Amino acid sequence: MSNRLARVSELLKRELGTCLERDFDFKDVLVTIHDVDVTPDLRHAHVFVGVVGDPQRRRSVLEQLERKRGHIQSQVMKRVVLKYTPQLHFRVDDSIERGVRVVNLLDEIARDLPPDETDEGEEPDWEGETDEHRD
């Protein structure tokens, strides 16, 4: 991604977050903007939205964002001046929930593993090395 596209993406991400915070009141759910991917021609922007809540609430939030897309675009573009106003496409990003699930699975596996066989007070065997040869 070019430097300009990265800057535009970050600017849109920040302004979309501000717009959602100011203009929307999502009940019993946390909504965040994770990333914005802008096409090279700046005509389309894919907005990856993180929604913490049950699947029914996720669908509701996405439907609400799609219904209000024109309003959101106009509010954001008042603050971000570009030659073309990118059309926003909202997508649910569940990467954080997947990451939490992976960490929980790793913790569960670690609990099931037998403890390490080396005693904590015992130094490992360095296969005949003396202190003079260690760095």
Image: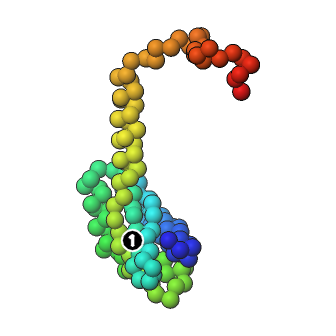
> Could you tell me which residue is drawn at 45 percent across and 64 percent down?
35
Q: Is residue 82 above or below residue 130?
A: below
Q: Furthest residue to the left?
A: 56
> Could you tell me which residue is drawn at 39 percent across and 64 percent down?
48
Label 1 Cα neighbours within 10 Å, binned few <14 / some 14-19 / many ≥20: some
Task: Report if residue 51 is visible in the image.
Answer: no
Task: Provide residue 65's location: percent of width, then percent of height.
Answer: 34, 69
- Going by the numbered disc 1, the residue's amino acid type is His
> Could you tell me which residue is drawn at 69 percent across and 15 percent down?
130
> Could you tell me which residue is drawn at 37 percent across and 41 percent down?
102
- Front-lying residue, 17 or 1: 1
Question: Would residue 8 be found to the left or right of residue 25 on screen?
Answer: right
Q: Which residue is mark 1?
A: 46
Q: Is residue 41 above or below residue 64?
A: below
Question: Would residue 17 be found to the left or right of residue 100 on screen?
Answer: right
- Front-lying residue, 114 or 27: 114
